[in-house]
Image (cartoon, rainbow, N blue to C red):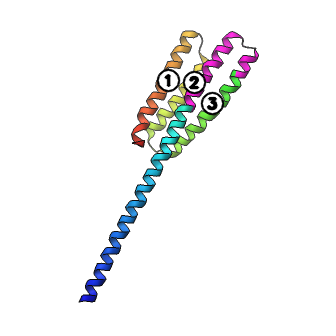
Amino acid sequence: MAVAGTLLGSVITHAFQRLASRRGELFTRAEALRQERMAAYGAFAAAVEDYRHGQATRWYRKEEDPDGEAFITARDEAHRLRTVARQGLYQVKLLTDDREVIFAAERAYECTREVSNAQDQADRDTRDAQARRAVEAFISRASPLVR
């Protein structure tokens, strides 16, 4: 009887240790994912803000002289910033299955892309404000996933 009790105690202890170990692994994994999301979401927002600024510079340089060197330089820089923002968008998509977060990120990217297509100053200002609000909406939607 004592052997059976000892054996039962060992089995129960092992089961609890295994459960505790699994919980620890799940916590560690969840924390790592939270950290990755925080880094990726922040990097994406920063990249889209840089892209928005690049799009504005591109628009202003085109208004000044559409054939000038300053416009070509600004256009090329906007293309580079677009690539960085797009890479950030891919990371957002890889780190979440939340469709609303993905939609908000895509919207921020698309609104920012449209800034340089403005027809006049008022249109540029409107598009720029839409892009800024879209980035803020992305942050609002994504932030619960990193808390």
Question: How many labels were placed on the picture?
Answer: 3
> Where are the magenta residues, as a range?
47-73
As drawn, the label of residue 82 is: 3
At x 68%, y 14%, the residue is 62
Closer to the chain start, of discs 1 and 3, is 3
What is the spatial separation of the Cα atoms under label 3 and label 2, in whole angstroms?
Answer: 9 Å
Q: Is residue 92 visible?
A: no
Give residue 11's position: percent from left, percent from top.
32, 78
SS for callout 2? helix
Looking at the image, residue 72 sits to the left or right of residue 108; the answer is right
Give residue 128's position: percent from left, percent from top.
53, 19
Q: Which residue is mark 2?
A: 52
Looking at the image, residue 104 sits to the left or right of residue 15; the answer is right
What is the spatial separation of the Cα atoms under label 1 and label 2, in whole angstroms?
Answer: 8 Å
Q: Is residue 25 visible?
A: yes
Q: Which residue is mark 1?
A: 132
SS for callout 1? helix
Is there CB contact under 8 Å for labels 3 and 2? no
At x 72%, y 13%, the residue is 66
